Image (cartoon, coloured by chain):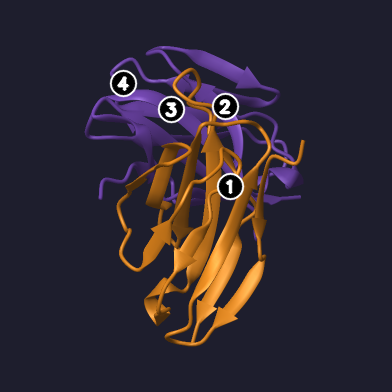
Amino acid sequence: GQQLNQSPQSMFIQEGEDVSMNCTSSSIFNTWLWYKQDPGEGPVLLIALYKAGELTSNGRLTAQFGITRKDSFLNISASIPSDVGIYFCAGTSTSGTYKYIFGTGTRLKVLA
Amino acid sequence: NAGVTQTPKFRILKIGQSMTLQCTQDMNHNYMYWYRQDPGMGLKLIYYSVGAGITDKGEVPNGYNVSRSTTEDFPLRLELAAPSQTSVYFCASRPGTVSYEQYFGPGTRLTVT
């Protein structure tokens, strides 16, 4: 099945640094969602995006719906140790709004 | 609100055994989903439901069955468990056509030996 290309796969950063990650698709998406998953837990919804070019913030997190509708970006500013986890993107394509396609995740590790 | 709850948290099955993974949501969401998550892979859709009495197959439905008799509950049945079904299973729900925000339960970690 189709999956989203998410990069980077993993990253180590120092506490206080800003983080950027992205997700790309070969097809146009109607919706982009960003999730965070901690070990042994279910994904937690961070941000939902609905329109091309949309920029939405949730605290230190900012996500953007790419203007081509084939990509999305997540930025974390001033990272803290509790930002550690796996960040997933997900989206719905024009061919099916019931179903979501998921990225394989970006594993973030923050060094104090 | 409890959100989406799943039971059990962990389970070990022997090959050929059957079990039901329970999922309940208290948000009155119309859409519900079952996913499996394998190491290093994205979530894969097993089955989904857009309302009570309506279910449909996802990407990897073989070896599983579902039912949706109420809005709140969406159990996943494993028949004749196989080692390939060792995975973490997540249930999720979404309000419906108005919102695309999907909310996940805490997961069930299943091992088949």
Which structural element holds mark 4? loop
Q: Colour of chain A?
A: purple
Report the side of B67 relative to A45 (left or right). Answer: left
Image height check: is A111 above or below A92?
below
* Amino acid carrying mark 2 in the image: Ile
On the image, the x and y values in percent for residue A57 come to 61, 19
Specify the subunit that label 3 lies on. A
Do the residues indicated by labels 1 and 3 lie within the same chain of the protein? no
* Residue on which the image places disc 2: A47
Do the residues indicated by labels 4 and 2 lie within the same chain of the protein? yes
Cα–Cα span, label 1 and label 3:
27 Å
* Residue on which the image places disc 3: A32
* Residue on which the image places disc 1: B73
Callout 4 environment at 10 Å: few (<14), some (14 to 19), or many (20+)?
many
Whichever of labels 4 and 2 marks the residue nearer the N terminus, that label is 2
Image height check: is B104 above or below B100?
below
Whichever of labels 3 and 4 marks the residue nearer the N terminus, that label is 3
Q: Which mark is residue B29?
A: none
Cα–Cα span, label 3 and label 2:
8 Å
Which structural element holds mark 3? strand
Identify the residue shown where x is 44% and y is 21%.
B97
